[in-house]
Structure formats: structure tokens, C-alpha cells
Image (cartoon, helix red, strand yellow):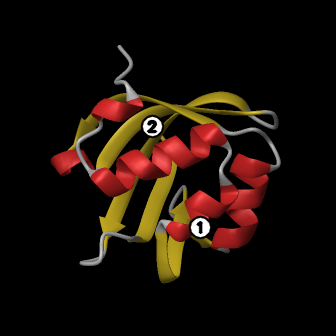
Amino acid sequence: MTIQTAKLSDPAVRAFVTAVNAHDRQGFMRLLAPGATMSDDGSDRDLAEWVEAEIFATHGRLEVDNESRGGRALVARHRNDTWGEMRTRWFFTVAEDGRICRFETGQA
């Protein structure tokens, strides 16, 4: 069962999913703390390159099935034009100012 984006518990994660699904690149980038990092399947990646390839250039979309850790851990179906749909896990680290300083994703 999908959790409506507006009902996600953590405000930063809710804004992240909203920006992804709206293909709002500027809004997405404003959510990230300076120097934010990310990993995919356990390997650190260049955040700007990954976001472009996996979200914005390929019409990425997230449908959240489950959340835990106060809303900072998700299991979601990530869909894009390159890979189709995959069941993925997402973990977020949010700085004191409410911006995301790291996210980790990979197949669930």
C-alpha cells in the first residue's frame, strides 16, 4: 500500500519526494545541505551526476510503500525511463537546519 507523499512523517524527506515527483530540480537542490553526499547500492556517487541521470533526465518518480526511523528510512518503488520500476530503500541524514546532508539508496 502506497503512503501519500503529503503524509510522510519527516518534513525534509516529504519535500524530497515531492520535488522528485514534480521534477522540480531547483526545489530539490534547495533541500540539500552544502556538500551533501549520496550513495547508490553502497557506493558513493557524484550527487549532481546521479540526480541528473536517475531522476531529472529520466523522469524519475518515487512511490513510498513504507517508512521507519521517524520517516527518514523509506522503502519505495523508484521508476525512471532507464531502469523501469525497482523496489528501493532510502535512508536520509538531515542536518539541524532541516536540509538533507546525505541520502543512501539501493535495491530493496
Q: Residue at x 59, y 37 (%)?
A: 21
In the depicted view, which residue is nearer to us: 7 or 71?
7
Q: Could you say where residue 11 lies in the image, as x and y percent from the top left? A: 30, 52
Q: Could you tell me the amino acid type at mark 2?
A: Ala
Q: Secondary structure at mark 2?
A: loop
Which residue sits at x=52%, y=76%? 37
Q: Considering only vertical position in the picture, is 92 above or below 23? A: below
Q: Residue 84 at what x, y percent from top left?
A: 73, 28
Mark number, residue 108: 2
* Residue 10 shown left or right of residue 108 in the figure: left
**In-image side of 15 versus 60 (left or right):** left
Tell me the mark number nearer the camera, choosing from 1 and 2.
Answer: 1
Q: Quadrant of residue 96?
A: bottom left
Q: Which mark is residue 29?
A: 1
Answer above or below: position of 102 versus 87: below
Distance (Cα) linking label 1 and label 2: 25 Å
Dot 1 or dot 2: first in sequence order is: 1
Give the residue at x 65% y 62%: 26
Farthest residue in the left direction?
70
Circle 1 sits in a helix, a strand or a loop, which is it?
A: helix
Q: Nearer the viewer, residue 52 or 12?
A: 12
Residue neighbourhood size for the residue with mark 1, other residues' Cα within 10 Å, grouped as few (<14), some (14–19), many (≥20) = some
Image location of residue 56, percent across then percent down:
75, 50
> Residue drawn 69% across and 48% down?
55
- The three-letter code of the residue at mark 1 reads Met
